[in-house]
Image (tube, rainbow, N blue to C red):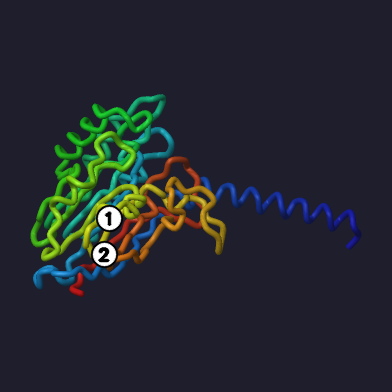
Amino acid sequence: MNRRKYIKQTFWGITGLGLFSGLYTWQIEPFWLEFVKLKMPINNLPDELIGKTLMQISDIHIGDRFDYHFIIDSFKKAKELEPDFVVYTGDYVSLSNDEVQYDKLQETLKNIVHGRLGTLGILGNHDYGKNWSQISIANNIADKLEQSGIKVLRNESVELNGINFIGFDDYWGRNFNPEKAMNGFDKTKANIALCHNPDVCDLDIWRDYNSWILSGHTHGGQVKPPFLRPPMLPVKNKKYSAGQIELSNGRTLYISRALGHLWQVRFNVRPEITIFELQQT
């Protein structure tokens, strides 16, 4: 093979690989849903909840940035698993031209996944509108979630069928009050905390909490080079990317890679819905 032919073939090979990679990250992986299944050992879990399932869905980001019907289709698949508990960990919308696409959100919420024993949610930063400061938008979204059968926790806790859920309002939002949220903590109960932004885990508010914390927010970076950390993460603590992370004092953090996306691009970070099987410690 002469040099000119070799260079020509190399050029077209690199071009083809680039086109395929672009197509994959734009049209394939953003819609390649993964159901991640994990065990969830919890202190003080009642015997009757052993083997029950808790489903986490995070960051659906309904708006104009990708085809939201993917979220609806994903909900339909998730319903087939018949979860016992379902928790939503924030960011239900993305702003489009400084406006919330309430019609698309309403259509999506008609297909929401409910748990047989309980359905709860918290808000994320995008649910607070522009600059995370529009409380009226957050209140509106919370109302729509409640009307759809999702109990929204805003710095409060609720005990549902043997589990005490502690819900933080968003760390970047105007209503963040972790001390108020932790007023509902009782170490003798089976506890699960919900906070959209995992940076909350580094605040000095946890006392002797020693159970699970479920978060979203990062999307796993959406693009992750193999064997390297994602180059862009919207958190101070860059260890908080995705997956299960053991923290101090017996706490376990789980960060969802998100179901939706801010922009329609993903590489090595598939969208996920997480199903935990409850166990006793």
Q: Amino acid at mark 1?
A: Gln
Q: CA distance from mark 2 to mark 1?
A: 8 Å
Whether tag 2 and tag 1 are in contact, CB under 8 A, the answer is yes
Place residue 279 in its image quadrant: bottom left
Which quarter of the figure is the N terminus placed in? Answer: bottom right
Q: Residue at the spot x=91%, y=60% of the render?
A: 2
Camera sees residue 150: no
> Residue 166 location, x and y as percent?
18, 52
> Residue 138 location, x and y as percent?
25, 33
Give whichever of discs 2 and 1 has the lower sequence position.
1
* Circle 2 residue: 276
In the rendered view, does 243 fall on the left or right side of 51? right
Q: Residue at the spot x=36%, y=55% of the render?
A: 256
Question: Mark 1: which secondary structure?
Answer: strand
Considering depth in this image, is 203 or 254 the residue closer to the camera? 203
> Residue 198 location, x and y as percent?
35, 52
Which quarter of the figure is the C terminus placed in? Answer: bottom left
Q: Counting other residues with Cα less than 10 Å from the Cα at mark 2, is it few (<14), some (14-19), or many (20 or more)? A: some
In the rendered view, does 16 fall on the left or right side of 37? right
In the rendering, which numbered label is found on residue 208? none
Place residue 83 in its image quadrant: bottom left
In the rendering, which numbered label is found on residue 56? 1
Q: Residue at the spot x=68%, y=51% of the render?
A: 16
In the rendered view, does 47 fall on the left or right side of 41? left
Q: Residue at the spot x=22%, y=50% of the render?
A: 113
Q: Amino acid at mark 2?
A: Phe
Considering depth in this image, is 199 or 196 the residue closer to the camera? 199
